[in-house]
Image (spheres, rainbow, N blue to C red):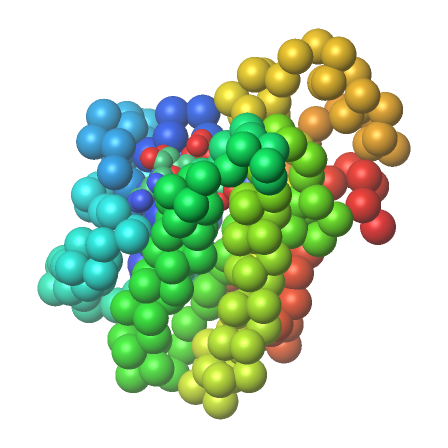
Amino acid sequence: MLDFKDQVVIVTGSGSPKGIGKTIAAKFARQGATVIIADMNEEGIKDAVQSIESEGGKAFGVNLNVTDKESVDKMVETVMDKFGRIDVLVNNAGISQKVTVEDMTYDDMYRIFNVNVFGLILCTQAVLRPMKKAGYGRIVSLSSVSGKRGGGVFGGAHYSASKAAVLGFSKNLAREVSEFGITTNCVCPGLINTEIWKSLPKELADKVIDGIPMGRPGETDEVASAIVFLASKEASYITGEEIDINGGSHM
Ligand code: NAD
């Protein structure tokens, strides 16, 4: 078991009832961390905090819109005032959209990039100061297999482009902040057993499964395991990297 005792971990987008973020938050809490459930979804925040507390873990909910710099700065200020440290940021909040490139509007492109890229950069910027001051930090960002090989119309090409941008951002950041004891890595999940998977028409789901050597979608816990490792002290010499979690669908 990896030890996060006394550590404070922020997971953005962890208020989705069946999403990856909630599982990530729960896993950190089970390993001793105080987890910040940061999301726009008030009900989801309450639910995630309650579920961690019911297992004896420590969680604190904060309302966050990653696209709003004021909201992001306020979240970091609140966490620092209350807990005095931020050890880990997991950039998990993200959105996708089923649309073809031909039909995509400027608003569609902006909305996706605003959350998946600009929001992720705002959250990262905001934690850098306390991490630098502490001489320690772990940043793990959710990219996607779509950012490496395209995901098709279902997620949208703007989504794939945004997830490729996350990889470039994370690698550049690694070059900037390594000297301050901060590592920054990504995970690239393939299709995971969340609402997105459940919403796929059967024909498309069968086609997707055919392309996965392991013959099944991934589980949220399988994504969380890789993230918790990258965020741990054990991953001390890994930065600017990404871990593919896709059952062999892209290698
Ligand atoms: P989800 O839709 O279940 O959860 C996303 C969460 O982000 C929601 O709780 C939502 O409220 C929050 N969010 C959205 N916009 C926000 C904003 N502006 N500010 C704060 N919070 C905001 O998504 P998921 O399927 O759990 O995916 C989580 C991450 O994993 C995303 O970045 C996604 O792109 C990535 N990913 C998912 C899959 C998959 O198959 N589900 C595969 C690869 C990558």
> Residue 74, how many percent across, how many down?
15, 59
> Which quadrant would residue 190 be assigned to in this image?
top right
Q: Can you give x and y, in whole percent of width and height, for residue 229 in the image?
A: 58, 56
Q: Residue at x 35, y 56 (%)?
A: 119
Q: Does residue 18 show up?
A: yes
| Image: 28 above or below 171 | above
Indicate left or right for 53 with 28 as reference: left
Report the residue at 81% width, 39% height from top. Answer: 249
Q: Which of these two is toward me, 249 or 109?
A: 109
* Percent coordinates x, y for residue 221 in the rendering: 57, 35
Farthest top residue in view: 202
Q: Quadrant of ligand 1?
A: top left
Residue visible at 49% across and 84% down?
A: 176
- Residue at 81 percent across and 45 percent down: it is 250
- The residue sitting at the bottom extreme is 179
Nearest the eye: 228 or 141: 141
Judge left or right: residue 131 versus residue 71. Answer: right
Can residue 188 be seen from the camera position used here?
Answer: no
* The image quarter in which residue 239 lies: bottom right
Q: Residue 130 at x, y = what percent?
A: 27, 75
